[in-house]
């Protein structure tokens, strides 16, 4: 690995980090798959849209194209938006892999590789999100991502079970 110095003379280096979060949802794998791939905007909180602060008129939406090469992206209207990632692998009802890149403006440069896996669990579904990231990863980034993914999966669970979504953890 090559290290270079930033403007303050501090060495920059690439890191690798990973996380896993899982949740059990009282819904069939088919229903969970539908929510993950087609109904994303119904449970993904607007506060998690990267463009939400620039679109107070609620014109932004989040979309996922559930096929290899498809996109997970925010459409802010007027040709503006943000690409969260590209879909790499689709095994309908079982697994969705994606790859995303983070620009310096969002804390990068870094790349993340993620996978949602769904597994029938009695009368419900176990959903697991695995993420591995490499590049410029601030020390707090993976802890923040773990909190964020747990929150998002909690929103997915609430959507499918018809319960109140979780509150964002304070502190």
Image (spheres, rainbow, N blue to C red):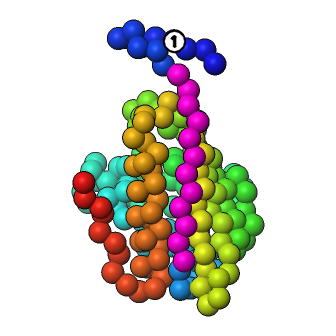
**What residue sits 68% from the left and 75% below the top?**
119
18 with respect to 93 (left or right): left
Judging depth in this view, the residue of 152 and 50 nearest the camera is 152
Per the image, the residue denoted by label 1 is 4
**What residue sits 42% from the left and 36% below the top?**
139
Query: Where does the image place residue 80, in percent across and percent down from the top left?
Result: 42, 46
Q: Where are the magenta residues, as a range?
A: 13-24
23 with respect to 167 (left or right): right
Quarter assignment of residue 31: bottom right
Say whether residue 28 is magenta: no
Q: Is residue 73 above or below residue 138?
A: below
Q: Is residue 171 above or below residue 166?
A: above
**What residue sits 59% from the left and 71% below the top?**
127
Query: Where does the image place residue 171, in percent across and percent down from the top left?
Result: 24, 54
Query: Where does the image place residue 111, in percent across and percent down from the top left?
Result: 58, 38
**What residue sits 27% from the left and 50% below the top?**
53
121 with respect to 47 (left or right): right
Quarter assignment of residue 33: bottom right
């Amino acid at each position: 690995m090559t290290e270079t110095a930033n403007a303050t003379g501090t060495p920059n280096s690439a890191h690798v980090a990973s996380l896993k979060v899982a949740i059990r949802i009282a819904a069939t794998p088919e229903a969970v798959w539908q929510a993950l791939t087609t109904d994303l905007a119904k449970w993904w909180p607007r506060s998690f849209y990267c463009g939400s602060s620039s679109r107070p008129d609620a014109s932004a939406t989040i979309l996922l194209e559930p096929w290899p090469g498809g996109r997970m992206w925010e459409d802010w209207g007027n040709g503006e938006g943000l690409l969260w990632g590209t879909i790499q692998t689709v095994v309908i009802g079982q697994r969705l892999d994606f790859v995303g890149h983070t620009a310096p403006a969002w804390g990068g440069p870094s790349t993340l590789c993620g996978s949602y896996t769904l597994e029938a669990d009695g009368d419900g579904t176990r959903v697991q999100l695995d993420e591995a990231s490499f590049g410029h990863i601030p020390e707090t980034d993976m802890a923040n991502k773990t909190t964020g993914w747990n929150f998002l999966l909690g929103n997915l669970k609430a959507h499918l079970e018809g319960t109140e979504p979780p509150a964002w953890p304070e502190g």
